[in-house]
Image (cartoon, helix red, strand yellow):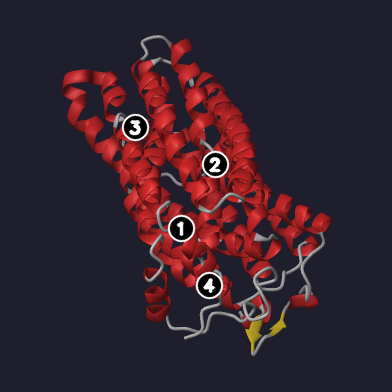
């Protein structure tokens, strides 16, 4: 494994085919690397969310309950994702991240295709475990990449480009899932979306170099993280902004993942759309709103951050306040037209929050443990946010179904705006300490 991933020892980088950049990448090459990483995020979004998009036909085919499907799309995926993220991040902080991401992408893409071969709930669950384990390498390694590709005042825009890929993945995945399911069934749909990942993995291996660590954080920041897990955790805990920012991200992801995982089901049950119609609406809401929002949020937050790091947190708090009434309107509107309008406006407002919070997290993270810090945040967010949100909605649906029937999901999803409100409070709390932490944080951690 070391010969494939490459090792970093005593400041010397040993990598496959010598693809290490000793100096910061040129602006043009950095853009190309970001585009390739965005493609990886697009595929990750498709492979992760294809199950939610096909939740109704898979549920009917396997005879599973809403709670079981909620666990499959949320808790089961998130628990594996979170459990494997820490060792994946340690590898990313100590090895060639390019080679590591190539292997991870090829693995989770293959496991997505294997999901299409499942004929029982247990088989599908085991295949999804493989997808989760592979995808857990993506965010930590990518955040470490971005931290070394760009200086602090340009990372928001770069992360915005990544999340555009993710939003397009939701959109394109929705369209493909709906069309392929209606024509060939969900088994073929799952197998079809897994194949492109192998092509992008090859593209990444051939064209993306490994950037020098700490390229924009001073001469001492390039050394790999040599601290124990416990000492690294203590270093993160000492960052005052880390706690409120993490709590805000947990509440944000309870809202986001409950909404995204159950929105297709909401459209089909409450507004009686077919899978093809649902996929078109879902693609419009997530694709158009997500793309525009991330373009705006990434670059505007970079401009705001010139006035101080706290302005990224102000932006998040304001967008949360704007988004709450919109998501309530989308859920409670009796007509599909106003509901879609509220969904799109909500996506425009809230869609860029992950971009801005990721840039803020990088600004307070030690340069030589960015992947580890991203994984710690991802672990908590996956278990308490992404894992809990869809499962809570599934349980509430089952509890309310007797009284409300298919309308139960309309009221279960009100968990999403309530959780958004809590996220906004946490982001405002984080704004009070982030200025100092943005100065001290990027310094390399030396145990």
Residue sitting at 50 percent across and 55 percent down?
A: 131
Say which residue appears at 54% left-offset and 60% top-offset. Answer: 362
Q: Residue 268 lies in what quarter of the image? A: top left
Q: Closer to the camera: disc 1 or disc 4? A: 1
* Residue 314, position as x, y percentages in the image: 47, 43
Cα separation, mark 3 vs mark 1, equals: 25 Å
Label 1 to label 2, Cα distance in Å? Answer: 42 Å
Assess disc 3: are there few (<14), some (14-19) or many (≥20) residues with their C-alpha within 10 Å of its C-alpha. many
- Mark 2 against mark 3, which lies toward the viewer? 3
Closest to the camera, between mark 4 and mark 2, is 4
Sequence-wise, the earlier of marks 4 and 3 is: 4
Query: Where, by quadrant of the figure, is residue 152 drawn?
Result: bottom right
Q: Residue furthest front?
A: 307
Residue under label 4, please give it.
369
The residue that disc 2 covers is 190
Q: Work out whether residue 411 can be spotted.
A: yes
The local crowd at label 2, few if under 14, some if 14 to 19, many if 20 or more residues have their Cα within 10 Å, is: many
Give the quarter of the figure containing the N terminus: bottom right
Name the residue that disc number 3 marks. 417
Residue contact at pointers 2 and 3, CB within 8 angstroms: no
Q: Which residue is mark 1?
A: 434
Measure how far apart labels 1 and 4 are at the Cα level: 18 Å
Local SS, label 1: helix
Is residue 194 visible to the viewer in this orientation of the structure? no
């Amino acid at each position: 494994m070391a010969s494939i991933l490459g090792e970093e020892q005593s400041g010397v980088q040993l990598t496959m085919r010598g693809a290490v950049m000793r100096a910061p990448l040129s602006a043009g090459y950095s853009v190309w690397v970001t585009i390739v990483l965005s493609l990886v995020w697009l595929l990750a979004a498709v492979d992760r969310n294809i199950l939610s998009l096909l939740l109704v036909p898979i549920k009917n085919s396997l005879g599973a309950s809403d709670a079981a499907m909620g666990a499959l799309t949320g808790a089961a995926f998130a628990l594996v994702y979170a459990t494997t993220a820490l060792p994946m991040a340690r590898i990313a902080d100590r090895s060639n991240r390019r080679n590591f991401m190539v292997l991870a992408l090829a693995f989770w893409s293959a496991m997505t295709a294997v999901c299409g071969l499942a004929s029982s709930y247990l088989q599908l669950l085991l295949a999804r475990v493989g997808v989760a384990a592979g995808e857990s390498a993506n965010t930590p390694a990518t955040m470490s990449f971005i931290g070394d590709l760009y200086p602090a005042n340009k990372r928001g825009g770069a992360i915005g480009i990544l999340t555009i890929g993710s939003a397009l993945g939701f959109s394109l995945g929705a369209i493909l899932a709906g069309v392929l399911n209606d024509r060939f069934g969900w088994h073929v749909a799952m197998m079809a979306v897994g194949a492109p990942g192998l092509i992008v993995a090859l593209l990444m291996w051939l064209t993306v170099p490994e950037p020098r660590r700490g390229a924009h954080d001073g001469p001492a920041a390039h050394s790999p993280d040599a601290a124990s897990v416990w000492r690294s955790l203590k270093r993160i805990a000492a960052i005052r902004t880390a706690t409120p920012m993490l709590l805000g991200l947990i509440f944000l992801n309870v809202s986001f993942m409950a909404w995204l995982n159950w929105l297709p089901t909401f459209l089909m049950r409450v507004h009686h759309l077919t899978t093809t119609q649902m996929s078109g609406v879902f693609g419009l809401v997530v694709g158009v709103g997500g793309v525009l929002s991330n373009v705006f949020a990434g670059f505007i937050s970079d401009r705001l951050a010139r006035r101080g790091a706290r302005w990224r947190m102000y932006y998040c708090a304001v967008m949360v306040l704007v988004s709450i009434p919109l998501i309530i309107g989308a859920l409670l509107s009796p007509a599909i037209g106003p509901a879609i309008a509220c969904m799109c406006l909500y996506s425009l407002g809230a869609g860029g929050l992950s971009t801005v919070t990721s840039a803020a997290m990088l600004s307070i993270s030690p340069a030589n443990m960015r992947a580890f810090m991203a994984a710690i945040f991802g672990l908590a967010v996956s278990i308490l946010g992404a894992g809990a949100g869809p499962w809570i909605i599934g349980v509430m649906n089952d509890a309310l179904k007797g009284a409300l029937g298919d309308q139960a999901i309309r009221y279960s999803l009100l968990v999403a705006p309530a959780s958004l409100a809590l996220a906004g409070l946490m982001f405002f709390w984080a704004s009070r300490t982030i200025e100092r932490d943005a100065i001290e944080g990027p310094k390399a951690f030396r145990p």
